[in-house]
Image (tube, helix red, strand yellow):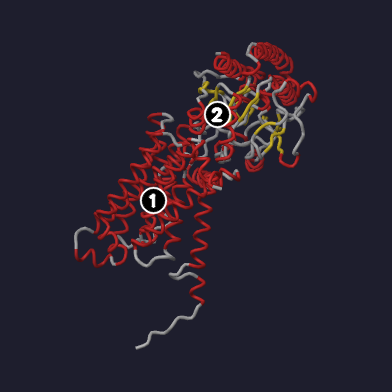
Amino acid sequence: MKTRVFCRIGLALFLLLGVSGAAWSADKVRAVASFSILGDMVSQVGGGRVEVVTLVGPDGDAHVFSPTPADAKTLAGADLFFVNGLGFEGWMERLEKSSGFKGKTVVASNGIKPLTMSEEEGHHHGEADEHDRDHDGHAKAEDADHEAADPHAWQDLANGKVYVANIRDGLIEADPEGKAVYEANAAKYLDAIAKEEIAVKAAVASLPHERRKIITSHDAFGYFGTAYGLEIIAPEGVSTESEASAQDVAKIIRQIKAEKIPAVFIENVTDHRLLDQIARETGAKIGGTLYSDALSGPDGPAPTYVDMFRHNVGTLTAALSS
Amino acid sequence: MIDAIIGPFIEFSFMRRALVGCLALSLGAPPIGVFLMLRRMSLMGDAMSHAILPGAAIGYLLAGLSLFAMSLGGFAAGLAVAIAAGLVARSTVLREDASLAAFYLVSLALGVLIVSVRGSNIDLLHVLFGTVLALDDAAILLLAGISTVSLVVLAVIYRPLVLECFDPQFLRSASALSSPTHLTFLVLVVLNLVAGFQALGTLMAVGIMLLPAIAARFWAEDVSGMILVAVGIAFIASVSGLLLSYHTGAPTGPAIILLCGIFYLLSMMFGPRGGLLWNLVPRKHLEA
C-alpha cells in the first residue's frame, strides 16, 4: 500500500514539476549529501571551498524519501556524492544511474564494522551490558539468517570520526588544491567530536546503572547504546516502514513493567502515537524528542551533528537521572 | 483456551482500545461498504486515500504537524472530490467511477504539488495514518461517534438509498430525494474513510468497509441481510485478527484484513447465494 503511494507520488511529481535543480556556483566544489547529518559533516570539513546540497533535509525521513527530478538534476551537476551506505539510502543507486551523475560517490561509512540487527525482534543483539561488551567487543553474531547491517552508524561518535576522515579524503581527491584547508578543518572538527565523545561518556556514567534503559520508536540508536552502554528497546523493526504487531507491543509493555524502565523517547522523524500508548499503559514518562536520522532546522535544538549529540544526551540524562 | 482469548484484553489496555476501535469501525463501516458495492463504487475507498492529500497538506502548512488540522483538511478535500464526482456523474455522460478517477488524480497531483512547494520530505500521509495498536481516547471517541452518526443517518435515508441502488430512474422520476440521498451518502462515505485513515490507517479503513460487505453478498439476498452478515464478519475478523496478531506476532492491521479476506474466499466458494460450489449443483427447473 505505502510503496504504491510513493510510486504514485513519484510519478505525479515527475509529470508535474518543472525540473529546477539547485543552481551551483562556479568556483566551488559541488557536493551532494544524501541526508542532513552527512550534509552538516561535509560542510564542516569543506568549509568555504565546498558547496553542499542535502537531498533529505531537516526532520525528513531518508528511509521513505523519494527523489524528484530536481534532485536528479542537482546530482547530475555535482562533483561529489556523499552517502551513508550500509543500505540506508535504498533509493540511491537508481538515482545515481538515472541522473547521469559523473562525479565520485563517497561512502561515508567505509571502514566501519557494522552492527547487525535482528529483523525478527527489531532489537539489537550484543547491546549495552558492560559484561557483554568486555568479552565480545562487538555485537554477537547469533541468528545470522535474520540479521541485516544496521545503517545508523553515525549514532556512535567514534564512527562519526571515521565518517569525517572519509569525507576529508574524498574532498582531497576531488580538489587536491584544497588539501591543507580540508585537513585543517577536519582536524578541528575531529577535535570537537572527540570532546563531545568525552562529554557523552561522562553523562552516561553519571546515570545509575539500573536506569540505563530506554524505549524509543525505531531502533536507530543501536550504535549509541552499544558505544555508551545504554539498552535500547524499540517497538518497530529496522525501518520506519514496518508495522508493529500486538505481540511486539505486549512484550515491550511487560518488559517496561518488569524492568521498571523509566522513560520512553520520541524521535523527530516518526509518528509517536504508538509510544504515547505504551507510555500511558506503563506509566513510563515521555522523556522528550531524540534526533536520530535527521537534524532539526537551523533554529531547532539539533542543527548540527555535534549539537544533535548534545541535545540527545541532555534529553536522556534529564529523563533518566530523575 | 479461554485465557488465550480473554487474557490479552484483561492484561493490556492497548488491546482493549484496539478492540473497541475495531468494533466501532465494524459497526459503522460495513453497511456503507454494502451500499458502495451495490453501486459499483467499491474502489472509492482506495481513491479517497489519495484524494485527501491536498487537504492534509494545506492543514500541515497552516498548522504544522497537527493531526486535527490535517484530518479536517483531508475531510474537506475528500468531500470536495466525492461530491464533485457525484455531481458530474449526474449531470454529464461520465459514469461515477470515471469522474471519481479524474477528480482524485487531480487532487493527488495538487497535494504533491503543495507538499513539494514547502520542500519537506516528511511523508504527511505516513504521519496522518494511524495504527490499530495506538488508539488514544480522542481516536476512539472519533470512531465511535462516526459509527453512531453513520448508523443513524443510514436508517433515515435507508429506503431512498436502497431504491437509488436498484432503480435510480424510478427514484428520480418519483421523488426529489434522489440527489440529496446520494450526496448524504457520499458525505457518510468520506466521513468514515477519513476517520478510519486517521485512527487505523488506510488498509484497515478500506478493508473493514469493503471486504465483509463483498463477502456478505454471497450469503444474503436483501440489503438488510447483507448488512447484518457484513457487520458479523467484520466483528469476528476484528477479534480473531487481534488475537492472531497477539499470539503469532503478525502485524495487526494486515492480520485482521487477511482474515476478512479468508471470509471472502470461503463465502465465494460456499456462499449459498451464487457461491462457486452451489453453481456446480444442478438446480431444479421451474415447473408449471
Q: Is residue A100 left or right of residue B284?
A: right
> Of residues A147 and B91, which is closer to you in this image?
A147
Q: In 3D space, how far apart are the residues under numbered discs 1 and 2 (Cα atoms)?
A: 39 Å
* The C terminus of chain A: image quadrant: top right
Can you name the residue that lies furthest to the right here? A135
Residue B48 rendering spot, x and y as whole percentages: 41, 48
Can you name the residue that lies furthest to the front here? B2
Within 10 angstroms of label 1, few (less than 14), some, or many (20 or more) residues?
many
Residue at 76% in and 36% down = A142
Amino acid, disc 2: Gly
> Of residues B5 and A285, which is closer to you in this image?
B5
Kindly identify which chain the residue marked by label 2 belongs to: A
Q: Can residue B249 be seen in this snapshot?
A: yes
Dot 2 falls on a residue whose secondary structure is loop
Image disc number at residue A57: 2
Image disc number at residue B29: 1
Amino acid, disc 1: Ala
> Of residues A11 and B149, which is closer to you in this image?
B149
Instruction: Count every numbered label the image shows and give the total.
Output: 2
Residue at 32% in and 58% down = B89
> Of residues A206 and A87, which is closer to you in this image?
A206
Q: Quadrant of residue A78?
A: top right
Residue at 73% in and 24% down = A166
Q: Quadrant of residue A155?
A: top right
Residue A188 rendering spot, x and y as whole percentages: 69, 12
Mark 1 or mark 2, whichever is nearer to me: 1
Residue A143 rendering spot, x and y as whole percentages: 74, 39
